Image (cartoon, coloured by chain):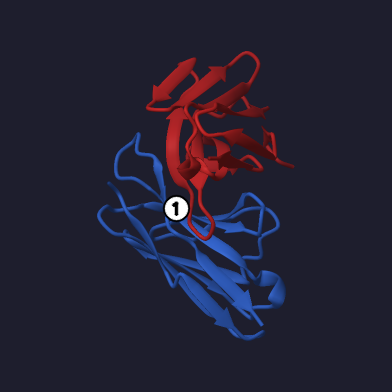
Chain colours: A red, B blue
Amino acid sequence: QQQVKQSPQSLIVQKGGISIINCAYENTAFDYFPWYQQFPGKGPALLIAIRPDVSEKKEGRFTISFNKSAKQFSLHIMDSQPGDSATYFCAASNDYKLSFGAGTTVTVRA
Amino acid sequence: GAVVSQHPSWVICKSGTSVKIECRSLDFQATTMFWYRQFPKQSLMLMATSNEGSKATYEQGVEKDKFLINHASLTLSTLTVTSAHPEDSSFYICSARGPTGNSPLHFGNGTRLTVT
């Protein structure tokens, strides 16, 4: 049973547009919520992460919004670029054991 | 930043043979490493948690006698797939916990295993 539900499965965005990926979780013991970017044939790379005592975190073009009461969090990619085309995974962890979402394949069209 | 190296990056083996995958933390000591498996176009599934100097903890449904994990030093964990079968073909990825209390997990670049 997947502990973190991620949507959409895929999305296409124009260059310069905004990509939005949503995740939801059930386990209230989760205390760390990272997002990873993965290119084909490579391991996932940490993009940005948030803890539940913060409602929003921004790093460059990437923003996490976190809603503790709704048990939801989302990734916004601003000014999307072709180089952002990849698969994005949300995750949640308790004591470093990560549960990953199913992944979202983002395609940025030039 | 912290680097985790996996070797080999890809391997092909015959059915019934065993293959060993190494995961090294290059510039930090990792008391805990994690092994994941990822099938094509799917998510990463945690297989086991590897602790230096002690037995690995396996997730439900993962055969510990088939996937042998050894974490003999603070910089090296190995995963051995024993008596491999074609259904074991997958992308195996390790991650290591960084050196400080709030360190993020660092992932290796994965090992593509193909069993023929």
Find disc 1 in the rendering and name its residue: B95
Q: Residue furthest right?
A: A1
Q: Quadrant of residue B70?
A: bottom left
Residue type marked 1: Ser
Q: Quadrant of the N terminus of chain A?
A: top right
- Decide which of B51, A64 is in the foreground and name it: A64
Q: Chain of mark 1?
A: B
Q: Looking at the image, is B114 positioned above or below residue B1?
A: below
Percent position of residue B84, x then y: 64, 78
Mark 1 residue element: strand
* Mark 1 closeness class: few <14, some 14–19, many ≥20 residues within 10 Å: many
Q: Residue at x 59, y 59 (%)?
A: B37
Front residue of B39 and A96 = B39
Farthest-out residue, front: A110
In the depicted structure, whether residue A101 falls above or below residue B32: above
Residue at 67%, 36% (x, y): give it.
A3
Left or right: A35, with A21 as reference point: left
**Residue at 39% in and 40% down:** B104
Q: Position of residue B78 (x, y in %)?
A: 45, 68
- Residue A80's x, y, as percent? 50, 33
Q: Residue furthest left?
A: B27
Q: For residue B17, what is the image quadrant?
A: bottom right
